Image: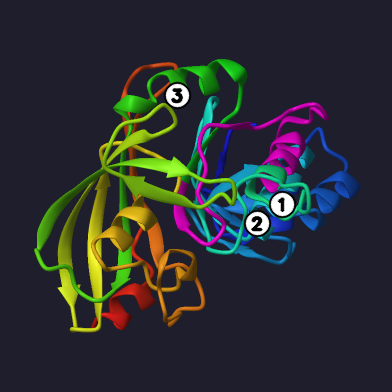
Amino acid sequence: MHPLRVTQSSLLLDFLLKNLKDWKPTKVKQTLKHGSVRVNGRTVTSHREALKPGDKIEILSVQTAAAEKLKARLDFTLVYEDEDVIVIDKPAGLLTMGTDKEKEETAYFKLTEYLRVKSGKERARIFIVHRLDRDTSGLVIFAKNAEAKYSLQENWDRAVKKYYAVTERVPAKKRGKIESFLVENEFRQVYSVQKRSFDAKHAVTHYSLLKENGRYALLDIALETGRKNQIRVHLSDIGCPVAGDAKYGAVTDPLQRLALHAYFLSVPHPSTGEIKTFRSEAPYNFRRLTD
């Protein structure tokens, strides 16, 4: 339904009854009660809401209203959504996708539920394009159909990914390039080697120092390659492990989480080819820790 415009002051219920002439009063009241009415973009359930000239009234379908309620309950922010992709700002502590031990407390599961409610299709699904570690926060893009997934992954070398990292100790140089080959052992520990081998993957990380206080440093990280645990390994290699990353040498955990945040993501849109750019603010405590 197209938005309705208020031309004279009235109460919301009176306005709806006057403008929705084909609706019975009980249907109008139920629509209000179920949160399907928006006034200037704000969900309103009270029939005594005062309206003024120029207000915009929107009537959502029951399906759309249910999806909006579910969206409001998500424990992460939907940064962007269209017919092909969804971009979220994932909090630290939330898995990108399920594991053998955890299926439901994941961004993948929650987005799938949201999409099914929104589309009204029980078999609707989300497609994984890439992932962040559980304790890394920041931007993650998901596809809403198989074609979008394949397009994003085929063009992933054109994606630009940047991170904020708080490290223990301060790098010797304010700017640097870290390059090595990464190998994963049987215990899923990734480490650097300097010579190419069959199972070694080339990795390049660029960093620049934003601020430091002698004990901790806030770095801007740009990835030339995107290998598993690349940032964590490379920063450990230069003697500056990510704060909270005991796996790769950190001895402090000041934020009770891995101090790594994916703040910038730029990708070619899977349908149009247009470069879409997304940003996320650095967590406040990242900057506070390096004051």
Q: Can residue 54 be seen in this view?
A: no
202 sits left or right of 255 in the view: left
The magenta stretch spans residue 48: no
Which residue is disc 3 drawn over? 152
N-term mark: 2 or 3: 2
Secondary structure type for disc 3: helix
The percent coordinates of residue 75 (x first, y second) are 62, 61
Q: Residue at x 36, y 67 (%)?
A: 242
Q: Quadrant of residue 24?
A: top right
N-term mark: 1 or 3: 1
Crowd class of label 2 (few under 14; some 14 to 19; many from 20; radius 10 Å): few
Q: Comparing marks 1 and 3, which lies closer to the viewer? A: 3
Crowd class of label 3 (few under 14; some 14 to 19; many from 20; radius 10 Å): many
Name the amino acid type tagged 3: Leu
The magenta stretch spans residue 138: yes
The percent coordinates of residue 248 (x first, y second) are 43, 64
Give the residues drawn in magenta, as a range. 110-139
Name the amino acid type tagged 1: Leu
Secondary structure type for disc 1: helix
Which residue is disc 1 drawn over? 70
Which residue is disc 2 drawn over? 74
Q: Which residue is drawn at 39% across and 24% down?
A: 269
